Amino acid sequence: MTLVPDLAPEVFRQRHLIEGLFSVVLDESAVRDYLLGLAGALGMTPYGDPIVFSPDSMIENGAGRAENAGYDAFLPLVDSGISAYFWTGPKFFSVVIYTCKGFDPEAGLSFTRQTLGAGEMVEAGF
């Protein structure tokens, strides 16, 4: 089943969503290390540093919600990028790998499971 019509069949794209619950202690440095490690595990080359935001400061200013505390992050890759979202309260993560180069999804799952101490995970390629 196709999720969406392919408007550019001549452009190769591989997308992979990984979600789960993490058991490690996460801070901004750990999020950066995870993104760089994931890129390495997938054989991808970053062309910039990971960008990590925390909506926690918005919560303190009254613009955000406590249930959304955590980190939003992005790593630019020569072949596209990785976006990652971490909710520190429920210890839930959601990672989207979007590339114009093929990769082994199992490598990303294995790295994520080990690095984040994730037991239960779900995933989908599209």
Image (cartoon, rainbow, N blue to C red):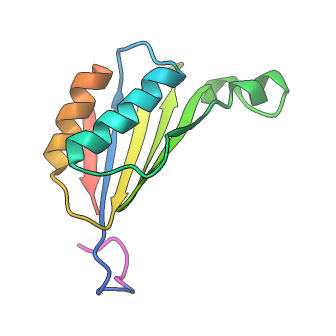
In the rendered image, which quarter contains the C terminus? Answer: bottom left
Q: Nearer the viewer, residue 47 or 66?
A: 47
Quick one: which residue is furthest to the front in this view? 47
Q: Which residue: 27% across, 32% down?
A: 112
Q: Which residue: 75% across, 32% down?
A: 64
Seen in the image, is 61 located left or right of residue 81? right
Quick one: which residue is furthest to the right in this view? 61
Q: Is residue 113 visible?
A: yes
Residue 65 falls within the magenta-colored stretch? no
Place of residue 91 in the rendered image (x, y in percent of width and height, measured from the top left):
44, 21
Q: Which residue: 45% across, 31% down?
A: 32
Residue 106 versus residue 59 in the image, above or below: below
Q: Nearer the viewer, residue 43 or 96?
A: 43
Place of residue 5 in the rendered image (x, y in percent of width and height, measured from the top left):
36, 82
In the rendered image, which quarter contains the N terminus? Answer: bottom left
Seen in the image, is 25 located left or right of residue 19? right
Place of residue 125 in the rendered image (x, y in percent of width and height, measured from the top left):
25, 57
Residue 2 falls within the magenta-colored stretch? yes
Q: Nearer the viewer, residue 21 or 103?
A: 103
Report how many numbered discs are placed on residues in the image: 0
Find residue 102 and report its image quarter.
bottom left
Q: Which residue: 35% across, 62% down?
A: 79
Quick one: which residue is furthest to the top in this view? 25
Q: Which residues are magenta?
A: 1-6
Residue 67 versus residue 17 in the image, above or below: above
- The kind of secondary structure the magenta stretch mainly shows is loop
Place of residue 71 in the rendered image (x, y in percent of width and height, measured from the top left):
56, 31
Q: Is residue 119 visible?
A: no
